Image (tube, rainbow, N blue to C red):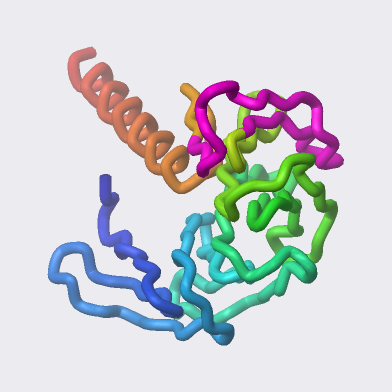
């Protein structure tokens, strides 16, 4: 659900753009410096847009699209890069988690510097889906599901999903935050809570 004059951010080809959600007019456009054929994944922060594309992660300024930092994720390949992040708090900046190839890594969301990386034990297709759970980072990849320690990347458990094949594993969990879908769901819940509180206040 769009709030106020919040732009619609889109990623396609090797571009990220902001559109007016009411008219569709383009507000700004940024060409990513490194070409690739994979999906352009977007994750919104308070002031930045985090972007994953063809083996690279970026942070862009939401107001004008300028690139704040980039990380080439060395030795992880040039596959699709999926993203997840907990909402930041005033006391602690939360890392940006990236999944690509058969790797998961945690980056400093302010600088793009790598904090840790974990190589998933089983090889498979390039899509690495990430879901932030209550305590762990849940990962789907190549016919397997994993739980990783969010602070170190250590694999806590794995499940080979018997007789479910070895294709991409997409995951979701009630109350999970951080992924693009999770962020949208959380925003929807917040709006519903705000509307309910406003109705309660008006009735009292």
Q: Position of residue 193 (x, y in %)?
A: 34, 26
* Residue 39 located left or right of residue 103: left
* Residue 183 located left or right of residue 110: left
- The quadrant in which residue 90 appears is top right
* Residue 4 located left or right of residue 137: left
Image: magenta residue range: 144-170
Residue at point 32%, 60% (across, down): 6
Q: Position of residue 122 (x, y in %)?
A: 73, 41
Q: Is residue 150 visible?
A: yes
Indicate whether 25 appears above or below 185: below
Residue at point 56%, 44% (across, down): 129
Foreground: 149 or 60? 149
Q: How many marks?
A: 0
Indicate whether 198 appears above or below 166: above
Is 159 a magenta residue? yes
Q: Position of residue 142 (x, y in %)?
A: 60, 42
Residue at point 49%, 38% (across, down): 170
Residue at point 75%, 34% (across, down): 148
Q: Residue furthest top?
A: 204
Is 156 a magenta residue? yes
């Amino acid at each position: 659900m769009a709030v106020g004059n919040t732009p619609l951010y889109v990623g396609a080809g090797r571009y990220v753009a902001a559109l007016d959600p009411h008219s569709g007019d383009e507000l700004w456009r940024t060409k990513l410096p490194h070409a690739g054929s994979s999906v352009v994944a977007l994750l919104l922060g308070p002031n930045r847009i985090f972007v994953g594309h063809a083996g690279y992660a970026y942070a862009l300024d939401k107001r004008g699209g300028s690139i704040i930092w980039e990380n080439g994720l060395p030795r992880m390949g040039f596959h699709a890069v999926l993203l997840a992040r907990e909402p930041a708090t005033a006391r602690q900046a939360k890392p940006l988690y990236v999944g690509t190839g058969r790797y998961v890594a945690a980056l400093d969301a302010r600088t793009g510097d790598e904090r840790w990386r974990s190589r998933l034990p089983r090889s498979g297709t390039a899509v690495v889906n990430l879901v932030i759970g209550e305590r762990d980072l849940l990962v789907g990849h190549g016919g397997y599901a994993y739980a990783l320690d969010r602070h170190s990347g250590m694999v806590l458990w794995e499940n080979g999903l018997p007789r479910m094949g070895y294709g991409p594993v997409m995951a979701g969990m009630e109350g999970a935050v951080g992924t693009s879908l999770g962020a949208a769901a959380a925003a929807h819940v917040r709006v519903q809570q705000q509307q309910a509180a406003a109705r309660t206040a008006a009735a009292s």
